[in-house]
Image (cartoon, rainbow, N blue to C red):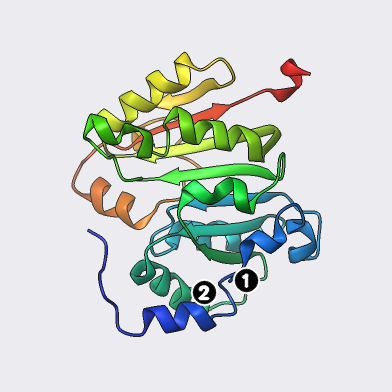
């Protein structure tokens, strides 16, 4: 469950040097923002930020942007960001529906979706981060060899995601596992807060990678 009403969260976010206040101004110029031409990876719905912080520490040669719409959890990520100097990590507070307003075509190398809201009711299916609508946005902002990495504990959401990607004409499904921690993909896996919680209870974690090949459409 997400935190609610953390005192001082709104003000902290508005004044944080780690939160990009006007991300639309950097559309098409994110490498200029970071001051280098390193690959850019984004995590959509990063929560408290454990996953993206760990990646930024492990891979200084990659630029990371954590996207979160809830102030309470973004505030916790800011607190964590203040503990270490990570020039390759920044945050954006926004709804994922605004991706195309913030990122240009072919600008992103990788997208992480971790334990996204399942939106279980069918009438809310388009809000799922693996819906055709969101997949179309990812296809636009990812570069030619870009990929989407998705993890969840929710079997229904995972089955929906597998089916949606398989039915797509522009995405290739790969590295699918219904039990990540007992698979060949566990070796280099970086866990999120939710993942640690669920796996400690013996719940299987599902994972897939969706890759597209834009060169096939040229």
Quadrant of the drawing holding the N terminus = bottom left
* Crowd rating for badge 1 (residues with CA inside 10 Å; few <14, some 14–19, many 20+): some
Number of marks in the rendered image: 2
The circle drawn on residue 81 is 2
For numbered disc 1, what is the local secondary structure? loop
The circle drawn on residue 44 is none
Towards the viewer: 143 or 179: 143
* Crowd rating for badge 2 (residues with CA inside 10 Å; few <14, some 14–19, many 20+): some
Q: Earlier in the sequence, mark 2 or mark 1?
A: 2
Rendered position, 82 above or below 139: below
* CB-based contact (under 8 Å), mark 2 and mark 1: yes
Q: Residue at x 56, y 48 (%)?
A: 99
Rendered position, 21 above or below 212: below
Rendered position, 159 above or below 18: above
Q: Residue at x 44, y 78 (%)?
A: 79
Residue at the limit of the structure toward the left, as seen here = 201
Residue under pointer 1: 86
Q: Quadrant of residue 89?
A: bottom right
For numbered disc 2, what is the local secondary structure? helix
Q: Residue at x 81, y 54 (%)?
A: 37
Residue 128 on image: x %, y %: 36, 38
Residue 162 on image: x %, y %: 40, 22
Residue 139 appears in the picture as rendered = yes
Quadrant of the drawing holding the C terminus = top right
Residue 155 appears in the picture as rendered = no
The residues tagged by marks 2 and 1 sit, at their Cα atoms, a distance apart of: 8 Å
Left or right of 6: which side holds 60?
A: right
Residue 147 on image: x %, y %: 59, 34
Rendered position, 160 above or below 108: above
């Amino acid at each position: 469950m997400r935190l609610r009403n953390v005192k001082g969260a709104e003000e902290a976010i508005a004044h944080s040097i780690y939160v990009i206040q006007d991300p639309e101004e950097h559309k098409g110029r994110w490498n200029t923002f970071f001051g280098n031409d390193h690959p850019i990876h984004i995590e959509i719905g990063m929560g408290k930020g454990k996953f993206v912080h760990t990646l930024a520490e492990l891979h200084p040669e990659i630029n990371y942007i954590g996207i979160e719409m809830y102030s309470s959890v973004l505030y916790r990520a800011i607190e964590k960001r203040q503990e270490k100097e990570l020039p390759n990590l920044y945050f954006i507070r926004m709804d994922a529906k605004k991706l195309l307003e913030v990122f240009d075509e072919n600008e992103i190398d990788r997208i992480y979706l971790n334990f996204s809201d399942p939106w279980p009711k069918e009438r809310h299916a388009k809000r799922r981060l693996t819906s055709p609508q969101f997949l179309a946005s990812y296809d636009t902002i990812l570069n030619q060899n870009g990929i989407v990495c998705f993890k969840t504990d929710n079997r229904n959401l995972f089955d929906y995601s597998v089916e949606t990607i398989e039915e797509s004409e522009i995405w290739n499904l790969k590295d699918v596992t219904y039990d990540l921690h007992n698979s060949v993909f566990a070796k280099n896996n970086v866990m999120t807060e939710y993942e640690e919680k669920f796996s400690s209870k013996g719940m299987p974690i599902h994972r897939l990678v969706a890759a597209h090949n834009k060169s096939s459409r040229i």
